[in-house]
Amino acid sequence: MFKKFFSYAGIEGFAKGLNWLTIALLPLFLPTEEYGTVGLLVAIEGVMSTVLTLGQGRAILRHTITFKEKMLPYALRLNILSVLVVFIACLIVSLFRNEILGIAFFPHLLILFISLLFYNVSGLMISYALAIDNPTFFRNSRLWYAVVKVVAVLGSCFLTKSGLGYIYGSLIAGVVFILLFHKEIFRHFELSKLLVFDKNLKFLFFFGLPLIFHALSGNILSYADRFFVEGFLNKSQLGIYTFAYSLGSSIFFFYGSVATYFEPLVYKFSAERERYQTILKFYLTFVL
């Protein structure tokens, strides 16, 4: 247990540390107002990612062992369908409104949603690696995405001197992930079945639906303040707030790293009471 814990949690902690480092380093070469734009984009990305995954990351952890058929293809299909729906909705809204919160619908927000598709696919693949206990794929996929994203985001923002570089850096990271792991991804996904709504797809949709509101409430608590700061003050003040917030919230990735290893175990052994209680005790000890 200890060896696997440090394998999974160490990689997750390192990846989360890189994500935090991205936000922490951007003020070195972005004006305060542009850094405020990054704060807004991170908030939009966090909230929309929660909605678009439809709770399938948690569903993979919970049902991969017990599901009668291969579950990952259904989760990937739901993710792609949700992004398509939002993408079409944004196209319609862009006909009547050019921007939201000072960010243009076309091309910036539309490209952000495309990058979210790749981001969510990577998240689902990582959840699947955890569910089937595949540390090699977890390590490779988690590290590649995190490293490419920090380099791409910092590089894009440095070259453009704009917070909108965050969007294009995220897109580059997503494209690189798909190119590197396309064989593993398409081994679980058939494009011909994308619009086939069978009972398994409906089951996973209704299982994940309540989880959207649970995760969304947490994200709103985390990010709503940025929209208020931008609305009542300005993007320059939001830039200062975002930097202070990133420093204060950095402790969270320690908890997230521990949860990465223990959460799949909690689901896997929930029926074995004695082992389940032992895992919960270890979980509590490591979190503290």
Image: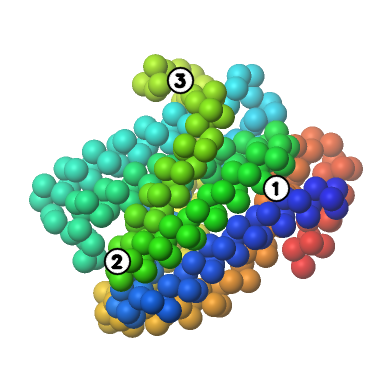
Above or below: residue 236 compared with residue 47 = below
Amino acid type of the residue that numbered disc 2 sits on in the rendered structure: Thr
The disc label shown at residue 263, or none = 1
Image location (x, y in percent) of residue 170: 41, 53
Image location (x, y in percent) of residue 28: 43, 79
- Depth check, mark 3 against mark 1: the one in front is 3
Quarter of the image where the C terminus is located? bottom right
Above or below: residue 128 compared with residue 278 = above
The disc label shown at residue 190, or none = 3
Amino acid type of the residue that numbered disc 3 sits on in the rendered structure: Glu
Considering only order in the chain, which callout, 2 or 1, is on the residue closer to the N terminus?
Answer: 2
Secondary structure, mark 1, is: helix
Question: Which quadrant would residue 163 be assigned to in this image?
Answer: bottom left
- Depth check, mark 2 against mark 3: the one in front is 2
Q: In the rendered image, which residue does mark 2 sit on?
A: 160
- Depth check, mark 1 against mark 2: the one in front is 2
